[in-house]
Image (cartoon, rainbow, N blue to C red):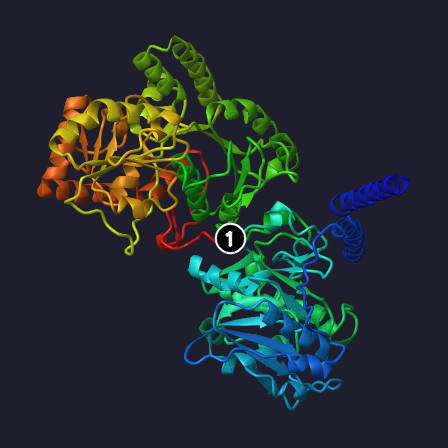
């Protein structure tokens, strides 16, 4: 116990010393040399503190039990790499100068943690003087280049890139160790981020401490390894980020792009700053430079040339800083001075930051509200706003949904790193330009706190739907007086949130008009649900079957009532004329009485992972909602796929659909059943509904309509919307490629 208390006391002392030095660094007028000395001391204290934590971390170094570099020749005999015919996906380029043992260890890790892609391994021996690299000549599948003279790192990489056969080149230092899946995470990023021009890895020290989570370039041309000596699993280091550069110890670049840009610029010969310069050239060409945290690489930093910038090859790090600064002076003008607000500088190309707070991490395959939230964050990124998300209900890291959001470039905060909203905004609140609060109770809890700690931020209240309207309708229909009383209380809460916010966003024109009639002085706008275009590979629904589907998460009470009414009052009328008709019920958490309806004609699917695939086998979507509010995602999901809809008025309210645009409206059991029978029995009617519904979905709720609407809302708040890229780069959920492994 005494040793534990001593350790805790030492940690507290280190933390206090770091905080004091940080204050001195940021607030006192010091010379550059003195500031550099203080910064180095801060890094040393950080390393000492985190090294104690790292003892509890799982070792990141792959288990190379069958390998040993004690016997060089014996280790080399065990090396063998696949040899592929035809096209190569990745050329892995490993430049080397001496340090043969480290090179062998790097090659061993490529065998233990191989890529699924077709790879060639190119080792460049840069005229090593201490090690005999000819020992590698006979390694199967290894391409070995022996430079007659020492060309330096830069020219060695350029030389290898010229002969590389891969679509991508992967530059990998010989003093590294790849981990399982690290290479595949890099190449997968290019398929999911079509504008990517360079993707770099998370670099870790052998003890698991973070070495680099992307890089920051300052106004004076100096560069930071962001996150150096920190704990690598903290949230700010674990989402896909647009960065200034990634160290070339582990970066992947399309080979054609590397060659087109002239490779590494020889003005940085023999080494240092060539990778930073390449990243700047890639960004200047209009492509993205991305940090991929899921690609983790162990880097034994400075093995070949040390870490002392006053001698040897390492001295070129300072020399080339001046060369770099001169070349990119105009571009660096918008960067902050060294060390100023690194949290703002770490997300390059995002000039504004937005905080979003909802109850739970979005799970878009389970409910429409999650689709809204996820697509809203993706639109914000498209408009130049870096999103940070807090799940206020439980602060949980939720598999697979938190990693999904992180892989899309969304910073997700979770316990134990962040435990409450006040803790976060008290420390970081001034960095936010916009805060979006979801749901009435959550907004009431946090709105005043946000005003206090985010004084410059605009606040948007996003209730998802008007809760008081939904509860009042349910209470009136089912004669639940307690719901009517609660609806009145909820109305007061929702009105108060609207008055206190800078803007309230609802999802339907019906709710917008209703709320404006109550609160004419408040800014109220609508942003409809957003739907991506259907993939060309997706199976389309077709006429000729009698399969009907209802979609809805049963945690939402209107959905259970809709199914009960349909099964009791409507389905019997349909089956009298269509005895083969089948009713499919899709949605998580169906109550027991609905689960017990299962039969040959009523199919209970529960949660369905691939909803589009199921909808492609249906002939009609039914939406028999008798109460509710907001815009119904189930309607948009069906029309997006070309699946006709029969719905009540409540099911389609506020969606701006004209008569015949994909849906037939019916509000009683007789007219509803008649509409279903007509739609399933008339090929011409079914086809018209399918085609017009799909066109209406794109026109009303597609990417272009959503971006235009959201830009209008932001501009009315005085927020910038000029950082807009081509819509081709905006991918919305549901995605047309597989993100399940993200």
Q: Secondary structure at mark 1?
A: loop
Taking the image as shown, residue 407 lies to the left or right of residue 209, namely: left
Residue 11 x, y percent position in the rendering: 82, 44
Res 614 → quadrant: top left
Specify whether residue 97 is in view: no
Residue 256 versus residue 238: which sits nearer the camera? 238
Residue 105 x, y percent position in the rendering: 68, 73
> Please, which residue is most extreme toward the right here?
2
- The total number of labels drawn is 1
Which residue lies under the disc numbered 1? 349
Q: Residues within 10 Å of mark 1 (few under 14, many from 20)?
A: some
Taking the image as shown, residue 54 lies to the left or right of residue 275, namely: right
Residue 311 x, y percent position in the rendering: 79, 74
> Please, which residue is most extreme toward the front here?
600
Task: State the residue at coordinates (46%, 27%).
Answer: 439
Residue 673 versus residue 87: which sits nearer the camera? 673
Residue 198 versus residue 559: which sits nearer the camera? 559
Residue 715 versus residue 503: which sits nearer the camera? 503
Task: State the residue at coordinates (27%, 25%).
Answer: 650
Specify whether residue 63 is in view: yes
Quarter holding the N terminus is top right
Seen in the picture, residue 702 relative to 736 is either above or below; the reply is above
Taking the image as shown, residue 491 lies to the left or right of residue 162, namely: left
Residue 7 x, y percent position in the rendering: 85, 44
């Amino acid at each position: 116990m005494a040793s534990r208390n001593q350790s805790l006391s030492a940690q507290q002392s280190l933390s206090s010393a770091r905080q004091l030095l940080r204050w001195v660094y940021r607030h006192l007028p010091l010379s550059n040399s003195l500031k550099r000395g203080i910064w180095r001391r801060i890094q040393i204290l950080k390393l000492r503190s985190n090294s104690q934590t790292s003892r509890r971390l799982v070792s990141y170094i792959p288990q190379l039990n069958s390998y040993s570099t004690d016997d060089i020749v014996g280790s080399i005999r065990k090396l063998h790499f696949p040899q592929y015919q035809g096209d190569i996906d990745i050329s892995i380029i490993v430049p080397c100068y001496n340090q043969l043992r480290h090179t062998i260890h790097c090659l061993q890790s490529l065998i233990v943690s191989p890529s699924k892609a077709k790879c060639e391994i190119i080792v460049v021996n840069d005229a090593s003087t201490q090690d005999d690299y000819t020992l590698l000549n006979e390694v199967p599948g290894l391409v070995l280049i022996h430079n007659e003279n020492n060309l330096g790192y830069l020219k060695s990489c350029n030389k290898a890139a010229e002969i590389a056969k891969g679509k991508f080149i992967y530059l990998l230092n010989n003093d590294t160790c790849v981990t399982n899946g690290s290479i595949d995470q890099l190449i997968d990023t290019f398929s999911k981020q079509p504008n990517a021009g360079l993707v770099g890895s998370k670099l870790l020290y052998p003890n698991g401490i973070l070495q680099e989570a992307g890089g920051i370039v300052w106004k004076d041309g100096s560069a930071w390894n962001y996150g150096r000596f920190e704990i690598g699993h903290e949230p700010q280091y674990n989402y896909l980020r647009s960065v200034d550069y990634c160290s070339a110890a582990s970066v992947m670049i399309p080979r054609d792009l590397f060659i087109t840009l002239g490779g590494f610029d020889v003005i940085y010969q023999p080494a240092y700053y060539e990778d930073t310069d390449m990243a700047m050239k890639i960004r200047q060409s209009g492509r993205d430079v991305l940090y991929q945290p899921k690609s983790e690489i162990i880097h034994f930093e400075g093995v070949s040339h040390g870490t002392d910038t006053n001698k040897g090859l390492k001295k070129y790090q300072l020399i080339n800083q001046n060369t770099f600064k001169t070349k990119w002076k105009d571009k660096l003008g918008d960067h902050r001075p060294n060390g100023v607000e690194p949290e703002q500088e770490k997300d390059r190309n995002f000039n504004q930051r937005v905080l979003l707070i909802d109850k739970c991490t979005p799970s878009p395959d389970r409910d429409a509200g999650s689709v809204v939230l996820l697509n809203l964050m993706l639109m914000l990124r498209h408009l130049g706003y870096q999103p940070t998300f807090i799940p206020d209900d439980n602060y949980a890291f939720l598999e697979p949904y938190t990693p999904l959001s992180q892989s899309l470039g969304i910073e997700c905060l979770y316990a134990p790193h962040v435990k409450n909203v006040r803790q976060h905004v008290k420390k970081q609140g001034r960095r936010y330009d916009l805060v979006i609060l979801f749901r009435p109770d959550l907004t009431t809890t946090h709105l005043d706190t946000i005003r206090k700690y985010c004084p410059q931020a605009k606040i948007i209240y996003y209730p998802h739907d008007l809760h008081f309207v939904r509860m009042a309708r349910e209470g009136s229909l089912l004669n639940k007086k307690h719901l009517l009383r609660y609806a009145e209380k909820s109305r007061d809460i929702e009105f108060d949130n609207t008055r206190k916010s800078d803007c309230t966003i609802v999802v339907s024109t019906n709710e917008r008009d209703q709320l404006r009639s109550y609160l004419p002085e408040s800014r109220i706008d609508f942003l409809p649900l957003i739907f991506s275009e259907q993939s060309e590979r997706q199976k389309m629904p077709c006429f000729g079957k009698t399969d009907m589907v209802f979609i809805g998460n049963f945690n939402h009470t209107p959905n259970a009532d809709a199914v009960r009414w349909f099964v009791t009052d409507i389905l019997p009328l349909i089956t009298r004329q269509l005895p083969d008709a089948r009713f499919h019920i899709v949605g998580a958490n169906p109550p027991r009485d609905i689960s017990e309806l299962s039969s040959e004609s009523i199919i209970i699917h529960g949660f369905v992972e691939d909803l589009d695939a199921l909808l492609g086998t249906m002939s009609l979507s039914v939406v028999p909602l008798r109460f509710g509010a907001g815009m119904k995602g189930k309607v948009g999901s069906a029309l997006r796929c070309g699946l006709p809809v029969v719905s009540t008025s409540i099911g389609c309210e506020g969606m701006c659909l004209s008569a015949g645009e994909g849906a037939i409206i019916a509000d009683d059991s007789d007219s509803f059943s008649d509409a279903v029978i007509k739609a399933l029995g008339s090929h011409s009617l079914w086809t018209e509904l399918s085609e017009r519904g799909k066109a209406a979905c794109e026109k009303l709720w597609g990417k272009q309509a959503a971006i235009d609407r959201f830009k209008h809302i932001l501009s009315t708040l005085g927020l910038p919307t000029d950082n807009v890229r081509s819509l081709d780069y905006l991918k919305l959920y549901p995605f047309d490629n597989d993100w399940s492994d993200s």
